Amino acid sequence: MVKSTGITRKVDELGRIVIPMELRNKLGISEKDPLEIFVDGSSIVLKKSNSSCIICGSDKDLLSFDNKMICSKCKEKISSLDK
């Protein structure tokens, strides 16, 4: 679902736009956070990148699980809980 915020920003001479602080705070986007850029028809969609393990924060050997990222070490630890 797309919801209008009523906020508009102009693109500067270098092609940049500023994401308002209120939106960054609401969505948990901090300075230097990576954002993924998608195109959906004629719309540009920004999404906070999930490029680290949601458990330990590692960025090595990542696997996608239920649209979340988890590293292979944490997967093994979780798997061993069932035994």
Image (spheres, helix red, strand yellow):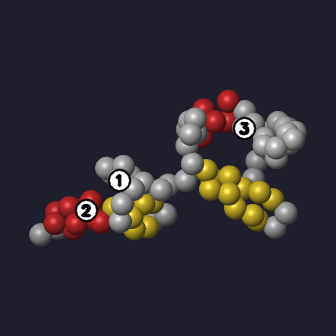
* Residue corresponding to mark 2: 73
Residue 20 image position (x, y, % from top left): 72, 33
Element carrying mark 1: loop
Mark 3: few/some/many CA within 10 Å (<14, 14-19, 20+): few
Mark 2: few/some/many CA within 10 Å (<14, 14-19, 20+): some
Whether residue 1 appears in this view of the structure is no
Quadrant for the C terminus, please: bottom left
In primary-sequence order, the first of circles 2 and 3 is 3
In primary-sequence order, the first of circles 1 and 2 is 1
Q: Looking at the image, which residue is at 58% across and 35% down?
A: 31
Residue 3 image position (x, y, % from top left): 76, 47
The amino acid type, in three-letter code, at marker 1 is Ser
For this rendering, which residue is in front, 78 or 39? 39
Above or below, comparing residue 6 to residue 65 in the picture: above
Q: Which mark is residue 58?
A: 1
* Quadrant position of residue 63: bottom left
Q: Is residue 11 left or right of residue 19?
A: right
Q: Are marks 1 and 2 in contact (CB under 8 Å)?
A: yes
Q: Distance between the Cα atoms at labels 2 and 3?
A: 35 Å
Residue 72 image position (x, y, % from top left): 30, 66
- Nearer the observer: mark 1 or 3; the answer is 1
Q: Distance between the Cα atoms at labels 1 and 3?
A: 27 Å
* Residue corresponding to mark 3: 19
